Image: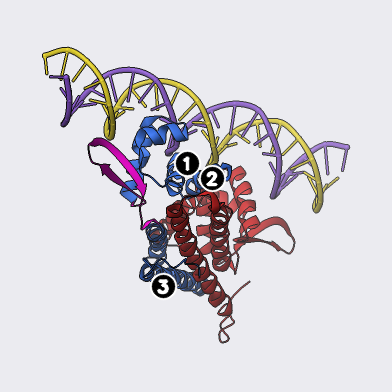
Chain colours: A blue, B red, C yellow, D purple
Amino acid sequence: MNCSRTCGDFVESMGLFWESEGLPRIAGRLFGFLIVQSEPCSLDDLAAALGVSKASISTDSRRLEQLGLITRVGKPGDRRDYYVVDADAPITSLELRLRGLRRAERSLDLLDLSSLPPVVQQRIQRFEHAHHRIVRALEDALAQIRSEKFPPASLSETL
Amino acid sequence: MNCSRTCGDFVESMGLFWESEGLPRIAGRLFGFLIVQSEPCSLDDLAAALGVSKASISTDSRRLEQLGLITRVGKPGDRRDYYVVDADAPITSLELRLRGLRRAERSLDLLDLSSLPPVVQQRIQRFEHAHHRIVRALEDALAQIRSEKFPPASLSETL
DNA sequence: TATTACGTTCAATATTGACTGAACATAGTA
DNA sequence: TACTATGTTCAGTCAATATTGAACGTAATA
């Protein structure tokens, strides 16, 4: 166990955060736990570390893998599944967020404005405009993050 | 009732969207419904239109008002509460989103890196960096939207 | 073949939180 | 005062879903 007391706090707060994003809390904890691990973890490792059933870990790890937030890796001479946090997880989670926003955008676009009173039309156009700005800002951020993915040398990167 | 068939769809999709954002579905429907109304609505209006109990409307409308997404207005000679969608709702909802992200940011910042293996340190720094980019992008979008709030020309609307 | 080690699935349980009806509080009105 | 119209609160119900233990499938190994 290579994490301190505050590390457990981190795992827990990730559980809460991802729960607020619609994932099961255990999936969030699992993701947070993998973030602070330096070695791949087996299902049993994870179940033991998080104190939950292997069934939950099995389900949630596959869900996270499906989302692209973690990846399954193998070890030679070992037929167990191991998981690590995906190197692109920051990018992926942003893409997931964008996907949700675009869905909301569509329901605004599809609304038939012509039959609505002008006040409402204008209001909806403001919503659409704001929404468009947000989506574009996130798309820009996504492109930026993508382009910076692997810094050339081991520069201790900040901003 | 000044909304067409697709307007009902819009209300429903707003219900689902805001449910995914952590609000009760009825609150999302209520918000969506107010978006496409040209006149302020009383609690009874809303309860009838959405087909839910007045208790739900009372609770959720106050919750939405608390969040700043809708505002309560009065009518002279009428002691009922009326609600309209807040003129700043697009801005406010972005602020709410930002608030959630900053909370997640904090749990990353508070993590004590010194005791963690370098691989993990680097990973967390990447997360922090990506997160920072996202937050900054949204802050920029927010500033943009704020600055465009009231287009100089047609000032016909608002209540 | 039997056995073990693993991952998955599923029926059942537990938990959470939305939603409601009914009781309540308050203020206006007769 | 009594009566009505409104909004709020709260205990209880209900639905959704997270979580689990146990059963299951499968593959390696002996």
Q: Nearer the viewer, residue C9 or A32?
A: A32
Q: Which mark is residue A7?
A: 2
Q: Within 10 angstroms of label 3, few (less than 14), some, or many (20 or more) residues?
A: some
Q: Residue at x 56, y 57 (%)?
A: B109
User: Is residue A135 positioned above or below A89 on the image?
Assistant: below
- Compared across the picture, whether A121 is left or right of B61 comes to left
Q: Secondary structure at mark 2?
A: helix
User: Is residue B146 positioned above or below B111 on the image?
Assistant: below
- Name the outermost residue toward the bottom: B153
| Chain name for mark 3 | A
In whole angstroms, how far apart are the C-alphas of marks 1 and 3? 30 Å
Q: Which mark is residue A140?
A: 3
| Chain name for mark 1 | A
Q: Which mark is residue A86?
A: none
- Residue where numbered disc 1 is placed: A25
Q: Secondary structure at mark 3?
A: helix
Q: Nearer the viewer, residue B129 or B35?
A: B129
Q: Which residues are magenta?
A: A68-89
Among numbered discs 1 and 3, the one appearing first in the sequence: 1
